[in-house]
Amino acid sequence: MIRVSLVALAAAMLIGSFASAQNTREQKVRGDKAKVEAKGFWIYNDLPQAYAQAKQSGKPIVAVLRCIPCEQCVKLDDDLVDQDQRLQALLEKFVRVRLVSTNGLDLSLFQFDTDQSFAVFLLNADGTIYGRYGTRSDQMHWADDVSLEGLAKALEGALALHKDYPKNKAALAAKRGPAPDFPVPEKFPLLKDKYGSQLNYEGNVVQSCIHCHQIGDAQREYHRAKGGALPEEVLFPYPHPKALGLILDPKERATVLRVEEGSLAAKAGLRAGDVIEKLSGQPLLSLADVQWVLHHVPADGGTVKASVLRDGKPAEIALELPKGWRKRDDIAWRASSWELRRRGLGGMFLKNVSPELRAERKLPAEGMALRIEHVGQYAPHNRAQHAGFQKNDVLVSFDGRTDIARETDLLYYALNELKRGSTVPVEILREGKKMTLKLPVPE
């Protein structure tokens, strides 16, 4: 009787905790809607209204896609909406619309890195894109990628492009991408019949919302269902310039802060202080615009031409990207990597072992040494746990490979090289002892 009572109590507490979390998320979404609509500075989740106002006023449009429950974008967004006077003055010159879900989103126009929780589009009323803003390359920290100053510079750049429009229309044409796999997110097979074209404010708003990262998940699932390997363009979307050794100043549009020695950017001749005005002929307003150009360079490589202002003088630089260049990027920070870990690593979340810990555990200075930070506890993310893997185990060999140094590289190998339904030998180090476990690969 006591056991039954304790189990019932634990279940009740779990259900209550889940309900409380759901209520909190519901409250955030509904509270945001009420607050923004009451202030009247932004149009709330109504893009057609923004188009109509832009056509009538002649102003450009700033459309902000923002995940309301996500805490990582709140500080920047709160500053944007409520505090920064410079941004307020600039935003007054735009028709402003806040989009809080991707339900019904036109994917022929809104193409962006779907692992972001804060993405800005700067548009003409006819759908021409002036530029994009917003990126991150870490789960928690965003200060290296976005700033209020950088957003202000992007807004100023968009206003300048708008002033010259339509004379510059041809130079802006490549800022729109090719036709998408599906016109709106809810048409993807993974999302079809689960979500509608609008949020359900009459019921559970949170459960009716298609989050940005779900578009990426649906796209990968769509390609995976076709069979074969996941294309590098899908697995490594919107490569960060850091993958090329190019570190840009988050407070500027596209100004080089530094270049990593021996990197592709260094080989091209880029230098600290260079202002990249155009990339592949496209005017740049932000780091996100740089990623847009890189996103459309094939995995087999190619030449990207950069128009640079160096010490006040124009220069042309050719950035050569070799075959497989996309795999230099890091995808481990992405929200979508959790699904990739389920498929490729049985739900394990891995981190590189530090040089100090390598020395302590008498591991080679190079080669595989990936420590298990987390093992999935619940299906379908618990295959590794069922196979005997534990937190703090260190992977030193995977399918006989000892040369895979990053979790990103291991994900690529597991997803594209392993046979579905097979079993993979994985050698681990646990409390100073080596052992081999068998990891099942999902069908």
Image: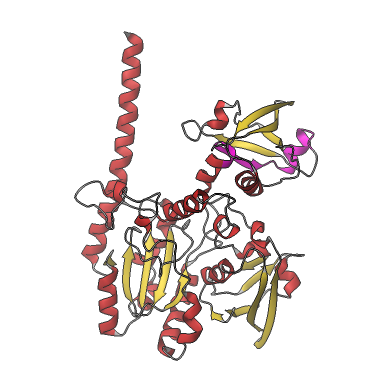
Q: Relative to 51, does residue 375 appear above or below in the rendering?
A: above
* Residue depicted at 66% across the width and 27% down the height: 437
* Residue depicted at 29% across the width and 76% down the height: 51
Q: Quadrant of residue 267?
A: bottom right
Q: Quadrant of residue 383?
A: top right
Q: Which residues are magenta?
A: 344-363
Q: Relative to 117, does residue 133 appear above or below in the rendering?
A: below
Front residue of 115/81: it is: 115
- In the picture, measured across the screen, residue 69 lies left or right of residue 331, that is left
Query: Residue 161, image x and y in percent?
Result: 45, 84
* Quadrant (top left/top right/bottom left/bottom right) for the C terminus: top right
* Residue depicted at 26% across the width and 78% down the height: 53
- In the picture, measured across the screen, residue 350 lies left or right of residue 170, that is right
Q: Is residue 355 magenta?
A: yes
Q: Is residue 269 magenta?
A: no
Query: Residue 32, image x and y in percent?
Result: 28, 56
Q: Relative to 438, does residue 412 appear above or below in the rendering?
A: below
Query: Residue 30, image x and y in percent?
Result: 25, 53
